[in-house]
Amino acid sequence: MFIRWIFEAVVIVSLTGYLFYNSAKAVFIMSPYIILHIWLRNKAYIAKCREKQIASFKDGIRFVNNSMHAGYSIENSFKEALIQMEQVYGKDDDTYKGFKKIVGRIMLNIPIEQAFYQYAVESGTEEILDFAEILKFAKRSGGNMSHIINNTANIITEKISLKQEISTVIAGKKFEQMILSAVPAGIILYMRVSSFETIEKLYGNLFGIIVMSVCLFIYIVSVIIASRISSIKI
């Protein structure tokens, strides 16, 4: 995966240097982008992993909620949910691993709210941290635990479901954006291949460097703006 990211960055830098400046020196100057590209790809990969974790967490909380409705205590509900999580997602799932830690801490007589909060902090996920805070409050207040957990679980699952629906809706738009982002570079490549003499004067001189740099800057800004427009946070 890391090697693939490096390869992607090298291709992008090489094509940019070739299309906009026709210069190996430009490729060298832009080479620090490789580090930025790896950082961006890693950030996107972590976000994707968290999306998967949130999706499985939604089901995990639903399993806990169903067990509590069946009369189990919240501690035993997590034990039952762990069994169901293994059946549905397997032992490699992040939520399964988290629930397993929770059950292990419960077996060591650590209070459920503390055990879950430790898991939430380890996950670093907003929805899980929100649930941890509600669970702590519910245990301290001594209210109707089943009712509080049920309401909280419903709110969180609705929020997660909405995020998933939005991701599905904008997935196609993101693909369109990716295609459109490649169009300007494709046009320059076509002109270089089919009629290089048309744009030859834009290479190897100060005026051409300035013009192509301005075009590249506008191109990068437009890609960034399009990416942010298609990224919706709830």
Image (tube, rainbow, N blue to C red):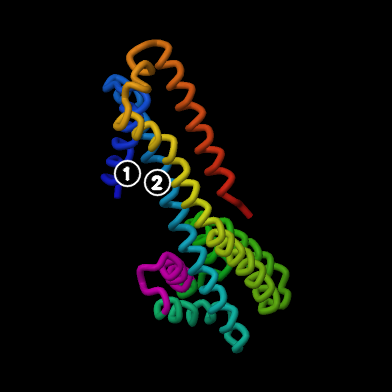
Q: Secondary structure at mark 1?
A: helix
Judged from this view, the residue extending furthest toward the top is 206
The residue labelled by disc 2 is 42
**Picture coordinates of residue 191 (x, y %)?**
35, 30
Relative depth, front residue between 164 and 68: 164
Residue type at numbered disc 1: Trp
User: Which mark is on residue 141?
Assistant: none
User: Which residue position holds label 1?
Assistant: 5
| Residue occupying image coordinates x 43% and y 58% | 49
Quarter of the image for the C terminus: give it: bottom right
Where, by quadrant of the figure, is residue 202 drawn?
top left
Which is in the foreground here, disc 2 or disc 1? Answer: 1
Residue 193 sits in quarter: top left
Q: Which residues are magenta?
A: 88-105
Three-letter amino acid code of the residue under disc 2: Asn
- Main secondary structure found in the magenta portion: helix
Residue at disc 2, secondary structure = helix
Relative depth, front residue between 94 and 71: 94
Q: Position of residue 60 (x, y in %)?
A: 51, 73
